[in-house]
Amino acid sequence: MKNLVVLSGAGVSAESGIKTFRDSDGLWENYPVEEVASIEGWYRNPALMLQFYNERRRQIALAEPNLAHKKIAALESYFNTTVVTQNIDNLHERAGSKNIIHLHGEVTKVRPENCHADEEGVIDIGYRDINIGDCDKNGVQLRPHIVWFGEEVPMMSAAIQAVEQADILLVIGSSLAVYPAAGLVHYTRKDCKIFLIDPKPIHIAGLNFTQIQEVASVGMEKFIEILRKNENF
Ligand code: NAD
């Protein structure tokens, strides 16, 4: 089987009712991004950060995977598939994808605030709220297991490794504006076929790719059609 890497951004979840922030003038669900997605924001106002991610958890509990998530999961029958997602939601796993790298963390997980994305300290809380005073067994305040602006992206090396081995790379619903994730496309082999699904035109200097200018669900149908025509499965 060929190696397929799907690099997804917030746009893949838009049809599930979860807003992207690049489409809302830098606001994420009406909050300024720097207030709710930076490490400085956590030091400044942890209560606001916890409230924001409590809201995101409740929203995601009510959302359903859309056709695009489901079609991506179905490709696992035909390709060695790795989903590298910038999303903090769990809609890829709920659609059935098995091999997922969460570059920016997961909203259903928390860790003690003194723990550096170390898996041992990570706790799966499902859709529960976390508030000031909720601590681990050592009495350390819990924080969302999210990679914020100003923090390292520990899953980058695993993502780079997957992209380097890709025969096909599909970028879906990502403006490719958030680094280092956006730089992943440059780790592809010369013979890797690159496709991009996004309703807005995307330009990437020095990269050869085919854009399917559609929303995620329609784009996935067209992408699968192209794969079929080229006898990829
Ligand atoms: P992004 O930079 O990946 O941009 C979103 C892209 O999706 C844009 O190019 C937009 O044109 C496209 N898009 C909009 N509607 C679409 C649709 N229906 N189908 C396909 N594409 C569509 O993402 P962002 O919103 O700037 O967010 C960046 C970071 O913010 C993420 O990496 C994540 O950490 C966090 N975030 C996560 C979620 C989530 O988990 N669902 C949602 C918002 C933000």
Image (cartoon, helix red, strand yellow):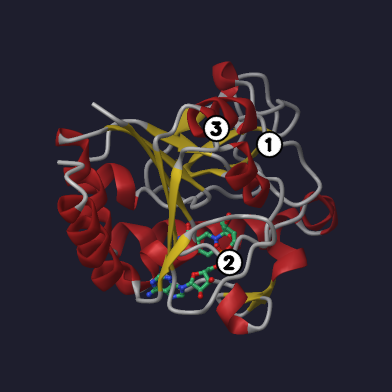
| Residue in the foreground of this view, choosing between 128 and 92 | 92
The local secondary structure at tag 2 comes to loop
Which residue is rendered at x = 55% and y = 32% of the image?
159
Q: Confirm if mark 2 falls within 8 A of ligand 1.
A: yes
Which amino acid is tagged 3?
Answer: Ala
On the image, the x and y values in percent for residue 126 come to 37, 42
Location of residue 117 with respect to 31 vertically, above or below: above
If the image is split into quadrants, where does the C terminus sit?
top left
The local secondary structure at tag 3 comes to helix
Q: Would you call the spot at circle 1 few (<14 residues within 10 Å), some (14-19), or many (20 or more)? A: some
On the image, the x and y values in percent for residue 15 come to 31, 73
Number of dots carrying numbers: 3
Question: Which residue position holds label 2?
Answer: 175
Q: In this view, does 144 lie to the left or right of 107?
A: right
Q: Which mark is residue 153?
A: 1
Q: Distance between the residues labelled 3 and 1?
A: 10 Å
**Which residue reaches farthest top?**
120
Q: Confirm if mark 1 falls within 8 A of ligand 1.
A: no
